[in-house]
Amino acid sequence: MLGDMGLSIGQVAERTGLSVHALRYYEKEGILAHQVHRGPGGRRVYTQQDVDWLRMCIMLRMSGMPVPEIRRYTDLVRQGDGNESQRLDILKEHQERVQQQMVQLQECMDLITYKVGIYQDYVNSIAARAVGQ
Amino acid sequence: MLGDMGLSIGQVAERTGLSVHALRYYEKEGILAHQVHRGPGGRRVYTQQDVDWLRMCIMLRMSGMPVPEIRRYTDLVRQGDGNESQRLDILKEHQERVQQQMVQLQECMDLITYKVGIYQDYVNSIAARAVGQ
DNA sequence: CTACGAAGTAGAGCCGACTCTAGGTCAAGC
DNA sequence: GCTTGACCTAGAGTCGGCTCTACTTCGTAG
């Protein structure tokens, strides 16, 4: 147990759903907004802000943002004030891609739903016939 | 040029957007509903049905169905009548996953839109201040 | 004092879905 | 008769995002 401000890598893994491996990987890839502090024995000590940041990264990953682009964004945040319009550009671009993804997914969904309907009707009709006999 | 019923692999690639490599790969993985006919010199001859089937496979892939599961579905279709309820199960299961995917994606979208809004306001306020001076 | 569990590092391995290479066949055009 | 281009096969290579291995170091519990 670390102080209530400090979380071990295992605790962060629990809280985020990432594996400890993934957490070390993310750090190596530079997608933590602030350098992780080290405690006794060289162990990582995470803050609640780190967890919050990671949760946002998880959202970006889930929606298909590649790790290198998350790093670009993270770098901007790390550099501090003055580059907000660049951060905005990255987010808007990603927003656009997610929008397209949702449209595509909806098209797939429509086709699948159409086919499910057809098969459902057919299977129902077979069942009805069996009952009728 | 083959007869109007026969398409070369290159023509199918054009029509589906898949690469010729991908088409051969899909065939090897057994996700073509009917065996591709071979023309002179051992060349593949596709029909319009093959193209239609491929387009559906593309939808399934786009929505995240793994190749092995597409093969399971394809196998059922190839086996012919009598297994419609199994096909329905696969489709319904996939439909469920796509639905979840869409919900997740919407959550990501909400977060991104929220952040875009904040950054947009901020960037606008900076711009307004610059104009004001 | 020994064993355990959780952490550390560096780097290898894995998985899915293609993509590409090497080497060959064949028909049409110059 | 030679080149070109589209096709063939078998199998190797790539890429992204982890995941796992090997080995070490701690701190605590039995």
Image: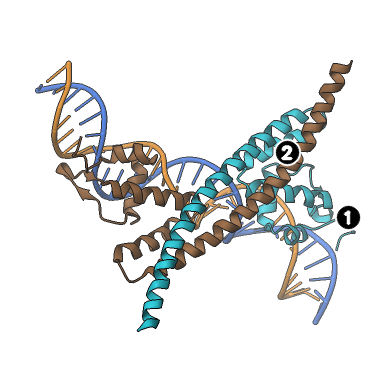
Chain colours: A brown, B cyan, C blue, D orange
- In the rendered view, does B27 fall on the left or right side of B130? right
For the residues bearing labels 2 and 1, Cβ distance under 8 angstroms: no
Name the amino acid, label 1: Met
Q: Nearer the viewer, residue A4 or A71?
A: A4
Q: Quadrant of the C terminus of chain B?
A: bottom left
Residue A111: where, in percent of width, then height? 73, 46
- In the rendered view, does A45 fall on the left or right side of B22? left
Q: Residue at x 43, y 72 (%)?
A: B124
Above or below — where is B54 with respect to B71?
A: below
Above or below — where is A65 with respect to A23?
A: below
Which residue was labeled with disc 1? B5
Q: Secondary structure at mark 1?
A: loop
Q: Is residue B47 visible?
A: no
Which residue was labeled with disc 2? B74
Crowd class of label 2 (few under 14; some 14 to 19; many from 20; radius 10 Å): some
- Say which quarter of the image contains residue C19: bottom right
- Say which quarter of the image contains residue B91: top right
What chain is tagged by disc 1? B
Gap in Å between the C-alphas at discs 2 and 1?
22 Å
Residue A129: where, in percent of width, then height? 87, 21
Above or below — where is B72 with respect to A93?
A: above
Residue reaching furthest to the front: B132
Q: Quadrant of the N terminus of chain B?
A: bottom right
Q: Nearer the viewer, residue A17 or A30?
A: A17
Residue B27: where, in percent of width, then height? 71, 46
Q: Earlier in the sequence, mark 2 or mark 1?
A: 1
Q: Residue at x 18, y 39 (%)?
A: A3
Q: Nearer the viewer, residue A63 or D14?
A: A63
